[in-house]
Image: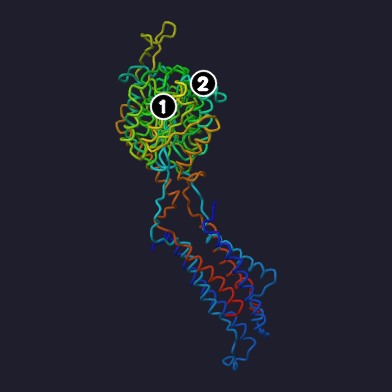
Amino acid sequence: MTLQFWPALLLLPVLITAVAAFSRRRKNSFQTYSGPFAFRGGGTEKESRMVSLLFWLGIALLCIALARPQRGFERLPEAGEGVDIIITLDVSGSMTQTDYYPSRLAAAKKAALTFIEGRPNDRIGLVIYAEQPRTLCPPTFDHGTLERCIQDAELGSLTDGTAIGAGLAVAARGFNYSKTARRVVVLISDGEDTSSRVDPITVAQAVNTLHGDSLKVYTVAIGKPSREEGLGVDEETLTSIAELNGGRLFNVESPEELDQVYAAIDSLEASTLPPEGLFVYRDAYMLPLVLGLCLVLVSMVMKYRFLKVVGE
Amino acid sequence: MSFQHPWLLFLLLIVPLYLWLRARWHRSELKVLRMFVRPVLWDRVVINPPPDRMVSRVVSALALTLAIAALAGPVWGRSAAVISTGGKNVVIALDVSRSMASQDEVPSRIGRASNEIARLAESLEDVRTALILFSGTSRLASPMTLDREYLESRLPYDVWSNPDIRPGTRLADMVELMVSVLPDMDLEASLGIIFSDGGFHDYAVESAVETANSVGMRLITVGVGGPIEVPIPIETGGVLLDGRDTVRTSLDESSLKELAERTGGTYVHLSDSEDLAGLVKAYLESISGRNSELATGGATGTRRYQYFLAAALLLFAAAQLLERRGR
């Protein structure tokens, strides 16, 4: 329950103070005389106080109604809301190297899990690739299932290899039913494309033609560049893929940097939806309004009816 | 301007009633006063402040009128913001028990059911759909997603491609998984669809109904197979045997019907399900309509009760002041 216009509650002390102040002034400016009207509003002092209490209690409830209490109903983002993200993870044999503790793959999974935790209102999916790509989880709000998929991501039944282009193509295909204007692929790789039938740059160009500005590709290079040792990551290709699709390449040389990369992507692709969730608010003023009005009415009737004029 | 609850305007009758009572009380007071004054002097008596307290009486009546008008929910204009009443979610459960390999449907019960699910998913645009495969255990094959292509890729066309699923047909676990997959939010329209040939081995219709009803999930059950007993083919060829006897299976509609009826859903047979998509859409629309009512309270415009209530509050306080000052 929330109050949409809480300052209305301040009206209560203002009204009480105003009435009290004017009442005191009246004592100074009027002279009472003997007669039946001296007993008007009579009854015992206790009863009189009760009537006053009922009146102000009613006014307090009306002030609460004026503050517009509302009840929130939670909902999920609609098809066109939020950001659709697909994490495309290299699970080739080289990702089991332990230069990142406990391994490149484990570090990448851990960073991905932290990233997901911070984006509860976005549809996120997971594609893994080695020699072939596979969609482990389509873009979904069911982040529990997605987390299980990330934890289970491994080479498994896939043949070893690195098909960056095929991974990107399958990831982009995951947006076929996406209605949102913001789609993001986070492509993680630690090697050179060795298995794609189509050149990754050509795939990146096709993705850009298909999705235009609505899809951005951020590439994350894990490990040392290939030009240094011949077996490392192909930074040049990853840079081209990212630049062709409005993204950029992140170079990661330690597990800590992976977290920073995700944080950077998080800020670059900030969700427009509140992290606490989406709510539709419904006014819930009727109850305080009805109760308040009843109490004021009762106090008005009691004042004249039950606290009778003496002698009637 | 219109009123959200116009019938509450009948309460305005309280206002003349109040004025009449105040007049009556005033006459009573004068009657008492007359006892203290000689009749010949009565016309010369000037009472200050006046006992009829006409100003406070009018102000009180005005305050009451405004408060009742506020209660009736005055509405005018339209809010610029579009009020979303949540999305639509369907969780489909497909029976992958051995009996679903029977060929009294073409190409088989499971093949026909999978084709029907694919057709259904294609027609449910903007509806999040999840897929559960169940027999002795239940497994989430596809999480809730708009990606119908992925969901279709997870559909099995034979019962032997799911080695991690144990034999049998357990209903209770499956319904619990269905409930856990659906978003737990007030405004999401959610529906469950079960494709099965019945014959639940855990006899758990009661607990399944309870689980579904606890979250308000309606179930549409789709019977797969026919009433005539048929043998069950096995992967290696031939049919399933129990000793020397051939194991036969037929559609058990009774539990599926009970499940649907007791959760506020419908039972349909696969052969009569040409318009299953239409039925599902109608259910989702009806749930969405209810959610819309829940979210908006039926208001179609911008509520303006605050203006009336604020004025009423000030007038009530003013009337209180005037009363104390004898006006």
The residue nearer to you, when weighing A131 against A228, is A228
The residue most toward the top is B244
Quadrant hosting residue B257: top left
Q: Position of residue A88 (x, y in %)?
A: 43, 29
The residue nearer to you, when weighing A12 against A90, is A90
Front tag of 1 and 2: 2
What is the quadrant of the N terminus of chain B in the image? Answer: bottom left
Q: Are the two marked residues, 1 and 2, in contact with CB atoms closer than 8 angstroms?
A: no
The residue nearer to you, when weighing A207 against B93, is A207
Q: Residue at x 51, y 70 (%)?
A: B63
Q: Is residue A109 left or right of residue B123?
A: right
Query: In the rendered structure, which amino acid carries the disc numbered 2?
Result: Thr
Mark 1 = which residue?
Answer: A135
Q: Is residue B15 left or right of residue A13?
A: left
Mark 2 = which residue?
Answer: A96
Query: In the rendered structure, which amino acid carries the disc numbered 1?
Result: Thr
First in sequence, mark 1 or 2: give its number.
Answer: 2
Q: Is residue B167 above or below residue A151?
A: above
Q: Position of residue B96 (x, y in %)?
A: 41, 21
Q: Is residue B99 above or below residue B282?
A: above
Q: CA distance from mark 1 to mark 2?
A: 20 Å
The residue nearer to you, when weighing B304 against B37, is B304
What is the number of the mark on residue B65? none
Letter of the chain that mark 1 sits on in the rendering: A
Q: Is residue B42 above or below residue A48?
A: below
User: Element type at marker 2?
Assistant: helix
The residue most toward the right is A45
Quadrant hosting residue B5: bottom left
Badge 2 crowding class, 10 Å Cα cut-off, few under 14, some 14 to 19, many 20 or more, is: some
Observer able to see residue A311: yes
